[in-house]
Image (cartoon, coloured by chain):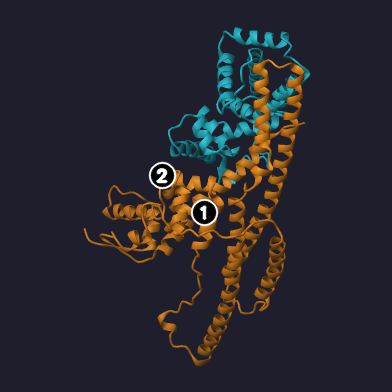
Chain colours: A cyan, B orange
Amino acid sequence: MCETCKVLVEENYQTIRKASLKYTSRFVETNDLINTVVIKFLNWKKNKQDANQPISINLNFFYKITKNAAIDAISPDTVNFEEEIEAYETNGNKTEIHQNLIAKTKFSSAETHALVVRYLEVLDENEKDAFLSIVTEETVEDFQKRNNIDNYHQALKRRRRAFQKAQSRLTNNGENVISIRSREGL
Amino acid sequence: MGTILLNIEKLNDFFINPDVSNSWENSLIKEFIERAFLIGKDKTIEDVFEKDLGLITLQFDHYEFFKLSKNKKAVQFFNNYIQKKEDLDDVLFDLAENNYYEFLWLYNDNYTPPIEKPYLEVSANELELNENRDSFFTSINMKQEERSTEVAKIIAEIDKKIEFANQILNQLKLKRNLGEDNLLNENVKDLIQAQIYRMMIDGVNEKDIKNWESLLSDASRQIEGASQFFEEDYNRTADYFQRTLEDLQKLRDDIINLDFSDFEGDTNLYSNINERYEDEFSMVMNNMSSSSYDLEEDEPETVEETLDRLTRKLNLTINKDIFVNTFAMNRFFEYYNDIRTFKSDISPIIGEWKE
């Protein structure tokens, strides 16, 4: 079954990273959330397969898992997730391939993670989502559909406002003040 | 309340102190400026500079007005204003994010800034020139006319090449995915995926499913390899023509901005530059003629039709006077540059995947 897992994670790891950045800002926190999301996904997939149900992943799938995981992480009662971890470790799901997929989905360096976070730090959750959507070339139509926005113009406006907010903080007289190339932001 | 003779100096004063609370003049000036900022969206040049002037008499044309986009205070005023007129800002952002090359092509094709020619200011007491001076200026004027004609020819030639490079970039952009769907086996992969799901539901034994998953993995690898090839091929070609276009535009600006009154300069300068570009451009064009890009023209759209098409998703309209609205155009270019910079910083981090 692992080939399908590999394909699905490779197709969606960028979405998992972006969704995790909506709710976290510290390197360890983001990677913990990514870890949780991938484990939840692997458990969900195994359950589907065990029940002979089709596996269907829509645009919003990983955003929903991530949001729920982020809420679980800050609530005092995290029994559900502990059960999921236990299930992952005992039901034969914890394989080397799966562990490897989790590791590769995490951010590899605290430094590059910090640079992305610097771009996002003045933005709220929805604005982070809109900004990351633009800079990773998600289409306006997909962004609109994923967020249940009524029309293209409203979706575009949300993206433009988020971009402008980041832009006004990040640029000074046309110069990008925290460009990755200058590394001055660190 | 009388009429206002509005000149550039008064506009500059207004931008320094745009207080309208105690001045009816400033209120009228503000209204005029705000109408001018909407040229290209809800207004045309004619609407603002010929009609609806009310009590204002203008002592400048639209070209002089839009040169104020170099004035920081004026830009600041525009930026504050456009926050209240979000539709215009939305159009500019959408064009920068999603239709940059096509809109840029239209802009280059439809907007040529007037060449500013230097002139000699002569005061009243200098009008009685002696014969020598007169002859000196006559000589200068003759040389200047000769030089202007030569420069105009070069500019015209560069413009042709800019148009052609733009056309190729536009074609590349529009036809980027042409045929790729037939070459990529995305649909084959989807069919295999569906087959695996069916087998899972039917309870087929695990060994058969694993065999199909192995085939799915092969199909994914093939798609990845082919996509990477197309992406690199496209990027390499597009980058080359973008650079060529920028070089040509810089060359054009440099020639226009040269000080024409410097007659001691190298008379072969322009022809040397032109020859160099002639050679480089010919080489590129020869290479392109043997490439696979199809440059056949469809029935051409008018500028208005193209602008309507580019803004249809937003359900907004703009008119071709947008190209002279340098406040709006500068914002469009600024959006594009910042989007590109942020993408190049963030995208590699989000997309990093170590095998």
Question: Furthest-bottom residue in view?
Answer: B131
Which quadrant of the figure has residue A170? top right
State which quadrant residue B252 falls in.
bottom right
- Residue on which disc 2 sits: B315
* Residue annotated with mark 1: B103
Residue B1, given in percent of the width and then of the height, sits at 21, 58
**Quadrant of residue A133 within the rendered picture:** top right
Q: Within 10 Å of the Cα at label 2, are there few (<14), some (14-19), or many (20+) other Cα atoms?
A: few
- Pick the front one: A182 or B335: B335
Q: Amino acid at mark 2?
A: Asn
Q: Is residue A85 visible?
A: yes
Residue located 51% across and 59% down the image: B299
Q: Looking at the image, which is closer to me, B251 or B190?
A: B190
Res. A39 in view: no
Q: Quadrant of the C terminus of chain B?
A: top right
In this rendering, the answer to whether A58 lies above or below B170 is above
Instruction: For mark 1, name the chain.
Output: B
Distance from disc 2 to disc 1, alpha carbons, whole Å, reads 17 Å
Q: Amino acid at mark 1?
A: Phe
The x, y position of residue B83, in whole percent, is: 42, 43
- Give coordinates of residue B72: x percent, y percent: 47, 53
Q: Secondary structure at mark 1?
A: helix
Dot 2 or dot 1, earlier in sequence: 1
Task: Name the outermost residue toward the left.
Answer: B1
Chain under callout 2: B
